[in-house]
Amino acid sequence: MKRILIVEDNADLASGLKRNLEHEGHKATVADSAKGALEAAARDTPDLVVLDLGLPDRDGYYVLEELRSRGVQSPVLILSARGLESDKVKGFRLGADDYVTKPFGVVELMARIAAHLRRAANDEGPASNGSLGDDVLQERYGLTERQVEVARLLAQGMSNAEIAESLGLSTYTARNHTEQVLFKLGASTRARVGAILRGQA
Ligand code: CA
C-alpha cells in the first residue's frame, strides 16, 4: 500500500481518482489547494503526488517547486488541461516525473502511477533474490490481491480463459488483470512473468 497525494480542486475528479487508487490498494489523500497540498505533504510524505496545475491559491508549479526545495523526492505526476509543450517543459524542469493532459484515460493513468511507484521502490531496495512473496508483489509492484493471484496463474502458463475459469471471472476481466500484471511487472511477454516471480528476471 502506497500513500498517494492527489492535489486537485475539481471535487468530482479528485474523488474519482481517489476511488481508483483505493481500488488499487493505495491510501489516497486529497488536497484542493496549494496550501493544503504542502501541509499534507509535510504531515506525511507521500510516495507519489498527482498534481493539478490550476489551483485556487497558488499554481501547481509552485507546489512542485516547494516540494523539491524541501527535499521531497517522491515521483510527481502533473495532471493538467494545459497541453502546451512549454507547460510540460516547465513542469519537467521543476522536477516533475510525468505529465498527463486532461482529459485522460484512467487505465493509462493508473498504469503510469504503478510504473512510477515500481521504479521508486526499485531505487530504494536492493535487488531481491529468490521468489517474490505476495507482499513484495503488492508493495513493490503495486499488484492488487487479485492481480497477485492472476500473476501466479500466469506463471503457471495459464491462458486468459483458464485464469478466468480458475478465479470465476469473465474472460474480459481476466484479460484486463493480465494486462495490468504485465504492465506493473514490466514484463514484455506472458512468459516473462514466471521468471520475474521466481526472482530470475
Ligand atoms: Ca484545477
Image (cartoon, helix red, strand yellow):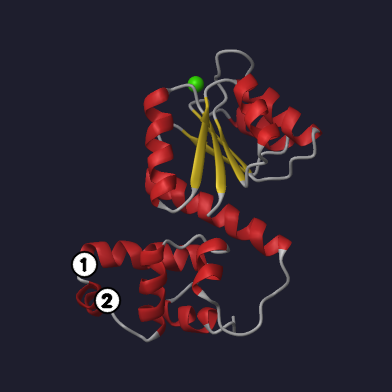
Give the amino acid at mark 2: Ile
Q: Position of residue 59 (x, y in %)?
A: 62, 19
Q: Is residue 148 left or right of residue 113?
A: left
Q: Which mark is residue 169?
A: 1
Q: Position of residue 39 (x, y in %)?
A: 66, 26
Q: Is residue 53 above or below residue 27?
A: above
Q: CA distance from mark 2 to mark 1?
A: 8 Å
Residue that lies at the very extreme toward the top in this rendered image: 57
The picture quadrant where one finds residue 196 is: bottom right
Q: Nearer the viewer, residue 34 or 111?
A: 34
Please state, as top left, top right, bottom left or bottom right, where the C terminus lies in the image. Answer: bottom right
Residue that lies at the very extreme toward the front in this rendered image: 43
Q: Which mark is residue 163?
A: 2
Q: Is residue 105 visible?
A: no
Q: Is residue 55 left or right of residue 21?
A: right
| Disc 2 and disc 1 in contact, CB within 8 angstroms | yes
Q: Earlier in the sequence, mark 2 or mark 1?
A: 2
Q: Residue at x 39, y 44 (%)?
A: 20
Secondary structure at badge 2 equals: helix
Q: Residue at x 45, y 46 (%)?
A: 109
Q: Residue at x 25, y 62 (%)?
A: 173
The picture quadrant where one finds residue 91 is: top right
Give the amino acid at mark 1: Leu
Q: Is residue 127 above or below residue 52?
A: below
How crowded is the residue under tag 2: few (<14 C-alpha within 10 Å), some, or many (20+)?
many
